[in-house]
Image: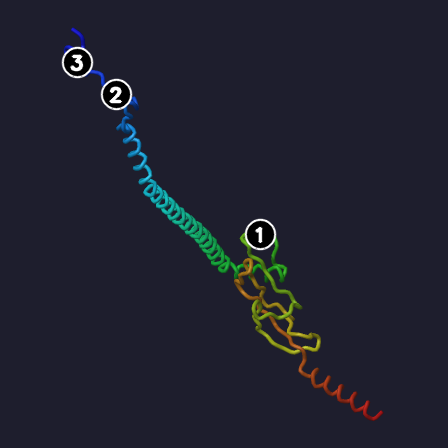
Amino acid sequence: MSPRENGSQEEPVIRDNRKIDPETGRAREATTVDDGAAQAESASVAQEPEVAAAEGSAADLLAERTGDLQRLQAEFSNYRKRVERDRITVKEQAVASVLTELLPVLDDIGRARDHGELTGGFAKVSESLETAVGKLGLTTYGTKGDPFDPTVHEALLHSYSAEVTEPTCVEILQPGYRINDRILRPARVAVAEPSEEEAPRDAADDSGAADGSDEN
């Protein structure tokens, strides 16, 4: 028995796509296939605005997400810089606190050196200590003859002298200490200013010179 007889397969469908009807000899109307193509084309044209709108919306969404990502990256970068700056500040404060406690010890070592008592094993210990604090950034300043600067000097004694032309540190009572640009302790000094008698004397000399010129 053939497949067609037992109904296991459908009969083939035959479509006559001839444009001239063989029976009437007249031209046939457009086939349903052409109608389907025209409908599909019109549907595609109708969908073009919707596709363009969807693409525009996707582009706007991408630009928005990109902007959010850039702002998040900038905020994270600023946060990382702030954390690093705070970490350095805390470290400097801790080092400064320890070194401030050691300043009296360094003063004692300086006085012992000035009196010639820094000898033997004590000398080596003091040198090791000074080297260690130097590695931590501690430096000393203050030299006899430096111009007086109230931002880095503390005047404990004051006098007048004809040997100076401006306020000058004539004696260093205690050296100053700093870490980089941070002052741990100002240098304690004796300050001398120009003698007050010099100004009247200069004025008198100028007056006498003027009188002599008038007589001539």
Task: Pick whichever of labels 3 and 1 is earlier in the sequence.
Answer: 3
208 sits left or right of 125 in the view: right
Looking at the picture, which amino acid does disc 2 mark?
Arg
Q: Are marks 3 and 1 in contact (CB under 8 Å)?
A: no
The residue that label 1 is drawn on is: 131
Where in the figure is residue 199, as x and y percent of width and height? Answer: 69, 83
Looking at the picture, which amino acid does disc 1 mark?
Thr
The residue that label 3 is drawn on is: 8
Task: Pick whichever of labels 2 and 3 is earlier in the sequence.
Answer: 3
Looking at the picture, which amino acid does disc 3 mark?
Ser
Quadrant of the image occupied by residue 9: top left
Residue drawn 64% across and 65% down?
Answer: 143
The residue that label 2 is drawn on is: 15
Structural crowding at the residue carrying mark 2, measured as other residues with C-alpha within 10 Å and reported as few (<14), some (14–19) or many (≥20):
few
Of badges 2 and 1, the one in the foreground is 2
Eyeballing the image, is 74 above or below 176? above
Of badges 3 and 1, the one in the foreground is 3
Q: How many marks?
A: 3
Task: Pick whichever of labels 2 and 1 is earlier in the sequence.
Answer: 2
